Amino acid sequence: MEVIHLAQKSDFTHTHIPLPSSKSESNRVLIIDALTKGKNTLSNLAEARDTQTMISLLKKNPPVFDVLDAGTTMRFLTAYAAVTNQNKVMTGTARMCERPIGILVDALRTVGAEIHYLGVEGYPPMAVHGLAEQKSKTVNIRGDVSSQYISAMLMIAPLLPQGLEIVLEGKVGSRSYIEMTLDTMKQFGISYSWQENRISIAPQAYQPTTFAVESDWSGAGYWFSLLACADSGELFLEGLKENSLQGDSAVVNIMGQLGVKSTFQNGGVLLQKKEVTGLKNWDFTHCPDLAQTIAVTCAILGQNAIFSGLESLKIKETDRIFALQQELAKFNADLKEIEPEVYQVVPSVTMPSEVKIHTYEDHRMAMAFMPLLTKTRVSIEDPSVVNKSYPSFWKHCQLAGISVLNQDN
């Protein structure tokens, strides 16, 4: 297994980080573009493997949509295949086939799609056989499992002969991602209404347009964390917007409490050190992809923070709760469940001379633990896992003056 070694470093001179494009935005505009038969002008699409996989599958249109480990791609393409009346087998990696998709399939079946599971009920692989006739204009979807199910249904809604009304049941998680989907659709000419727990979209046509994808706030979080944990320095993150619809822009507020001042300037945001005021608690319901980053930051900075809204972490690329607990323990920290679905970060008291991080085939595990290099030497197993969302991550670490040494074990 490949391993990289990161030398200890805690001072960072002013460095510009050319952040990757948002794969969340990219994957949405790619589906909309496909639904308008490619009549749009798209720019700054993400280099992330998830996005490149979607681009390739949409272009080649093979009989089997093998999405590898891309959850968003699996969910969006399943709905796309149904509404465009295609016969497709949907599959992916072994882990992808362990990630539930029953809520989306049930919603698609409700409106008239024919879909059959090829293995375990409720999980990929499955066969999609199109949507010949719309049987219902209303679907009920749980809001607390994955916003991607909801976004997948929203994007196909304008093409349904009767349109669609989605009734969100219970607590709505990752609300900002649903808002991102609707705002993106609006930029392609779609009108909608969202009143209380009901989102209504009438039958209508997407309008071709020009769309530039914003930089990725999820990727920005690792650099906020690095500076929060460092002794000194400043970083400029390129391509971020102050009024972003990406839920992970919440990192500005969170890291403001953990010692990072954010100043938006032309072309991005300047990060500078400031006093740590302390993070007492945070609900990650609408920004779950930040949880690993913030947990590691709090563990390093000595913050006994309380986290909630982590329910979706157990069905991501890995069980992220378990993975965090295992790796935090390597530098004498913990993420302890203090009541059902509520966790406390138990910070590190003593730091070992070196920490080796196992990544669990999860890109965010590799990047979230990178800031440990501000306190000790760090080794990261399977570093190429970052290709899923941020292929240039280790190169950008070198831009910041971090020594990255590759080694095959």
Image (cartoon, rainbow, N blue to C red):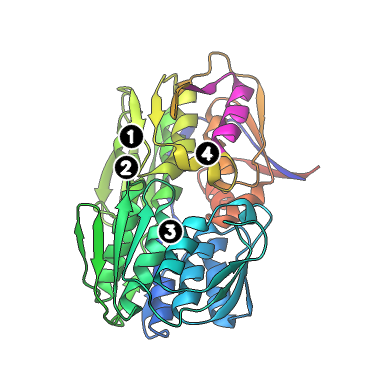
Q: Is residue 152 magenta?
A: no
* Disc 1 from disc 4: Cα separation: 15 Å
Given the image, on which type of amino acid does mark 1 rest? Ile
Given the image, on which type of amino acid does mark 4 rest? Ala
Q: Which residues are magenta?
A: 320-337
User: Residue at image x 26%, y 48%?
Assistant: 264
Quadrant assignment for the C terminus: top right
Question: How far across and down, in percent of the image, does residue 142 sit?
Answer: 38, 51
* Disc 1 from disc 3: Cα separation: 27 Å
* Disc 2 from disc 4: Cα separation: 16 Å
Disc 3 vs disc 2: which is toward the camera?
A: 3
* Disc 3 from disc 2: Cα separation: 22 Å
Q: Earlier in the sequence, mark 4 or mark 3?
A: 3
| Residue 339 image-quadrant placement | top left
Can you tell which mark lies on residue 250?
2
Where does label 4 land, which residue?
Answer: 368
